[in-house]
Image: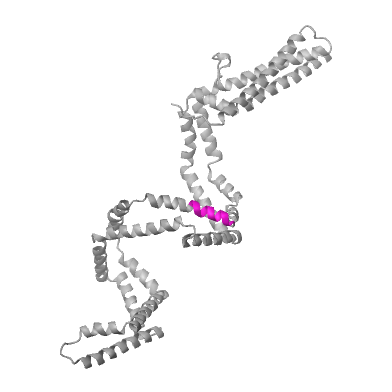
Amino acid sequence: MSFLSPSPADEARRAALRRMRMVATSLLVLAFVVFAVTNGHQSGGWGYVHTAAEAAMVGALADWFAVTAIFKHPLGLPIPHTALIKKRKDELGRSLEEFVGDNFLTEEIARERLASANVGVRLGTWLAQPDHRTRALTEGARIATAGLTRMREEDVHEFVVNVLMPRLIKEPASPILGRFLAGIVEDGAHHGLVEMGLSEIHDWLVENPKVFSTLLNERAPWWTPPWVDERVINWTYQQALNWVRDMRADPSHSARVALDDLLVQLATDLHDNPEVQERAEALKERVLTHPQVGDTVESLWVSVRTSLLAALADPESSLWARGHAWLGEMSETLLHDETTRARLEGHLADIVAFFVNTYGDELAMVISTTVDRWDAEEASQRMELFVGRDLQFIRINGTIVGALAGVIIHAIGQVL
C-alpha cells in the first residue's frame, strides 16, 4: 500500500532532477572526449589538459557512485553499502525521530522560541487593524457555529439527565450556597436586587390601585358594609405604598435591616446547621429529580442556541460589536501593558511546555512510525526526487575539482 501520494509539484522536481543529471553527465562525457582526443599528446600544455580530463573523469565517476549509492545499486550491482535509503529506511526514520526530539521538542527550546517571537506584541499589532479583528471574529463565529450546530438536543438532554443532574444531586450544595450568600451579603451585592424589587413593587402599586383594591375586596368578610371595606382597603393601599416608598428612600430602614439579618442567618444555617442543610438538600433533590427538568433545560438550550446562531450569523449584531470592542481593548492592552503581555506569553509558554513534555516523544515518534509504513523503493524514489537535484551538484563539483587536482598533480610531476 502506498503512503506517499504524489503532489502537483513532483513533475517540476522530476524535470529539474533530469536537467541537473544531464548537466553532470555532460561534464563527464566532455571530460572523456577531451581525454580521448588528447591521448598521445601529453607533452607541453596538452599534458595538463589530458591529466585534467583524466582526473575530472575520476572525480565525476567517484561522485556519481557516491550519489547513486544513496538511493540505489549503481548499475544494478548489489555492491555492499549501496542503496542506503532502501536498506536503512527504518533506521534513518528512528535517527530522525531522535534528532527532532532532542533538538526541537524540548521545553527549553520551546520557551526560547516563544520568548524571541514576541507573541504579545505581534498579536496586539495584528488586532489593531479593524480588518484583522473582523477576520478573527469571522473565524471564531465559523468555529462556534459548527460546534453549536453539531450539538444535538437529545445529547444535551442525555448529558443533563444522566451526567449533570446525578452529579449535582450527589454533591452537597448547602455549604457552598451558604458561603456564597454570606459573601454577597457582606459585600452588599444584593442591595441592587432589593432596590430593583422595591422599585417594581412601587411602580405596580402606583399604576394598579384598582387591581389592589379588587384583590383585597375579594377577601373581605361578606358581612362587613361596603363603605367600611372601601375605607379599610384605601387605608391599607396607602400604608403599603408609603411603606414601600420609605424602604426605597431609607437604606437603613428596619425592614431592610431585617432582610439583611435574615439572609445572614440563612447563610450561617446553610453552612453550619445540619437540620437546615438537610432540608436544603432535600429541596435541591426534589427540584433536580423532577421529570420536567431535563425537558426544560433542553428547551432553554434550544432557545439559547437559536439566539446565538442568529447573532453569530449577523455581522451587524451586538455580539459582533462587543467582539470588535473587546478585541480592540485587547490590542491596546497587549501593546501598552507590559505586565499583561508578559502574563499572556508566560501562560502560552507553560501550555507549550506542558505539551512538549507530555507529548513530545509521541510527536517525534510520528516520524519513525510514518517512515516505517513507507515502501522502501518508493521512499527511495521520493527522497531522490526531493534532494537528488541538489546532490547532482556534488557530481558537478567533483568533476571540476578533479580537473583542478589533475592540473596541480601534473604540474608537481613536471617540477619533480
Res 127 visible:
no
Residue 19 pos. (x, y %): 64, 23
Residue at the image position 56 percent from the left and 29 percent from the top: 10
| Relative height, residue 150 to residue 76 (above, below) | below
Q: Quadrant of residue 289?
A: bottom left
Could you tell me which quadrant the C terminus lies in? top right
Residue 309 pos. (x, y %): 41, 56
Chief secondary structure of the magenta portion:
helix
| Relative height, residue 220 to residue 403 (above, below) | below
Query: In this image, 266 relative to 353: left or right?
Result: left
Query: In this image, 236 relative to 125: left or right?
Result: left
Residue at the image position 22 percent from the left and 85 percent from the top: 217
Task: Give, as a single range, the part of the protein colored magenta.
Answer: 129-139
Res 44 visible:
yes
136 is within the stretch colored magenta:
yes
| Relative height, residue 165 to residue 20 (above, below) | below
Q: Quadrant of residue 23?
A: top right
Query: In this image, 90 relative to 201: left or right?
Result: right
Residue 414 pos. (x, y %): 82, 13
